[in-house]
Amino acid sequence: MTDFNLFEWMIAEKIATNAFNASAILNGIKAFQVESTEEKKARVLLYRKWRTKTDKKNQLPTWQAFELAIAGIDPDDVEPRQISMDEWQDIMHADIMNGEAQL
């Protein structure tokens, strides 16, 4: 029986581009805190769901994707929250008029 190599798996699955990238992801998701390979893989997959390689414009900061993966939060289970520019301007205008704006 051969040992499962998480680095090779991450590269083969195109989760990481090389061993250095795989190492950075494993450190970020604190893979050392869990013993099970399946738990490590689950964190890696959640991280990659939060921090996709393709959607650079709407991407979360890396640190936040790590924290969400560690917490086990799947982006598919989270309701999207976006405020349109019109709504944001209405909120800011109301806050300014009430003297509550934090600019």
Image (tube, rainbow, N blue to C red):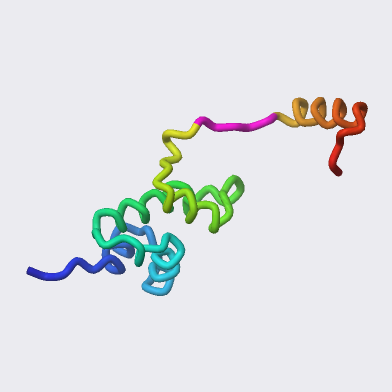
For the C terminus, the quadrant is top right
Residue shown at 68% from the left, 30% from the top: 83
Residue 61 included in the magenta stretch of the image: no
Front in this rendered view, residue 13 or 36 = 36
Residue 98 image position (x, y, % from top left):
90, 27
At 35% across and 67% down in the image, what residue appears? 32
Compared with 93, 46 (above or below) is below
- Residue 91 x %, y %: 80, 28
For residue 24, side relative to residue 9 (left or right)? right
Q: Viewed as shown, does residue 37 lie left or right of 53?
A: left
Identify the main secondary structure in magenta: loop
Whole-percent x, y for residue 63 in the image: 54, 58
Q: In the image, is 36 to the left or to the right of 64? A: left
Q: Which residues are magenta?
A: 79-83
Q: Split into 4 quadrants, where in the image is the N terminus?
A: bottom left
Q: Residue at x 16, y 70 (%)?
A: 3
Residue most extreme to the bottom: 20
Task: Give the residue displayed 86% in from the left and 25% down from the top.
Answer: 94
Q: Nearer the viewer, residue 96 or 50?
A: 96
Q: Is residue 101 above or below residue 50?
A: above
Image-quadrant location for residue 85: top right
Does 24 appear above or below 73?
A: below
